[in-house]
Image: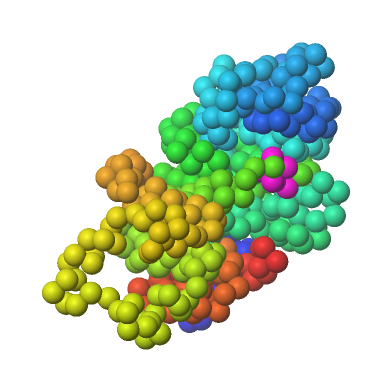
Amino acid sequence: MRKHKFTMADLAVKPGRRVGDAELPKVCVVILNLNGRHHLERCFESLAAMDYPKDKLDVLLIDNGSDDGSVEECRKRWPWVRLEVNPRNVGFAPGCNQGARLRGDASVLAFLNNDIRVDRGWLRELVQPIARGEAAATGSKMLSWDGKTIDSAGGGVNFHGIGLAYGYKDVPSAEHDVPRKTLFACGGAMAMDARTFDEVGGFDNEFFAYYEDVDLGWRTWVLGHEVHYVPSSVCWHHHHGTSKRLPLETVRLIQVRNPLYACFKNYDDEHLRKILPVALALFLRRMLIVSGIPSDQPFRIEKARTADTPARPSKISKAIGKLTRRPAPGAAGYSPVTSVCAADLIAANDLLANWEHWMQRRAEVQSRRKRADQEIFRLFLRPMWCIEDDPQFKGLLEGSAEFFGVTKLFEGLTLMTKDPAK
């Protein structure tokens, strides 16, 4: 008997009956803002034009310490928007959780980026699977601002946690119009049953921003619920409208650290023991690529002058001791690295130097597991995807994944063939 080949069609879902106005849940739409005054008009005007029952709609803006007049303009022009002002930027994940706590009697939470405008039926369509009890969370079809390409049609990850958007940069077509299961809903345009949001722990505050949606979706599946992609819920997005204004290294740190956090929390013990060594090896290779450190002199003993040779064996312990002391800038033994490399190093250290803490965080998830990893792997879409172009990085990924048994875990589960970042 021929073994069934797993395809995207296996993730498709058939929606149930339409939910009418009387059964639609009350929704609190939570929007985070940080100096996004220039985005607010298009966002709020599109929300005001939605066909969702007004008595079941609450819009809440969480301002994260803006100094561009966002707060004043919101109060003046959109008094129907509830406003909560933080004195500083508390982050996307904590800000969304803050909004969730302020939802009042809303039974569904919707999270929307400030740099998005929505279709008239965006929210009505987005909550349908939740109202029918088919899914705990849902994600929209996100288009580029001009509508010419897909920004996101559901999400997946590679095995070491790097997120990908299905259909990214594709011209919209029929393949993006199929409702299906998805690993996570993009936090820029998603909805979730409020009680389930609380039950699974909401967004992880320690992520601050980026990959908090990947972690939430992955954890939602681990804890026995489902996340669905709803293509009839349409919005248009200014990609990274806020983050592109921040220093590169600050964004880099959380973009490489948070995938590691998500893997550490959500894989079961058997699979984490296989994947973590590979993930850390790739982390190290990535750091070296961006470090600016030369690969030969002055580090190669084969090319060192006689006077530069290391201490004799009897002095090895003393020499190693010196390596643990940080030399001053400009002193002998000091080698600077790029800020991006430093960000990567700090990112890895955030996990490794806080091992007991993250083991506890991991235990919080694993002790409540209701779904096996094998059921979730099919949602990754492209588990062996390699974003780096460096040949040695690719060789390390393929060789270490084979050696540690990672490759076998995902055999036959590559459903997305187009590179999402190219």
Q: Residue at x 75, y 38 (%)?
A: 116
Disc tally is 0
Residue 11 appears in which quarter of the rendering? bottom right
Horizontal side of residue 61 vs 309, given as left or right: right
Q: Is residue 415 left or right of residue 286?
A: right
Residue extending furthest left?
Answer: 314
Q: Which of 420 and 124 is in front in this view?
A: 420
Residue 8 visible here: yes
The stretch in magenta equals 239-244
| Image quarter hosting the C terminus | bottom right
Say if 183 sits above or below 404 in the image: above
Nearer to the camera, 160 or 201: 160
The secondary structure that most of the magenta stretch takes on is loop
- Outermost bottom residue: 302
**Is residue 25 rendered magenta in the image?**
no
Query: Residue 54 location, x and y as percent?
Result: 75, 19
- Residue 351 percent across, percent down from the top left: 37, 50
Q: Which colour scheme is used?
A: rainbow
Q: Is residue 180 above or below residue 288?
A: above
At 78% across and 33% down in the image, what residue appears? 39
Q: Give the x, y percent position of residue 129.
A: 62, 40
Is the residue 308 above or below the residue 87 in the image? below
- Which residue occupies 66% across, 68% down? 419
Task: Identify which residue, 356 or 224, lies in the foreground.
Answer: 356
Nearer to me, 144 or 198? 144
Does 193 appear above or below 308? above
Q: Which residue is drawn at 62% across and 25% down?
A: 65
- Return the x and y of residue 188 as percentages of the image width and height: 66, 40
Toward the front, the furthest residue is 307
Q: Can residue 43 be seen in this view?
A: no
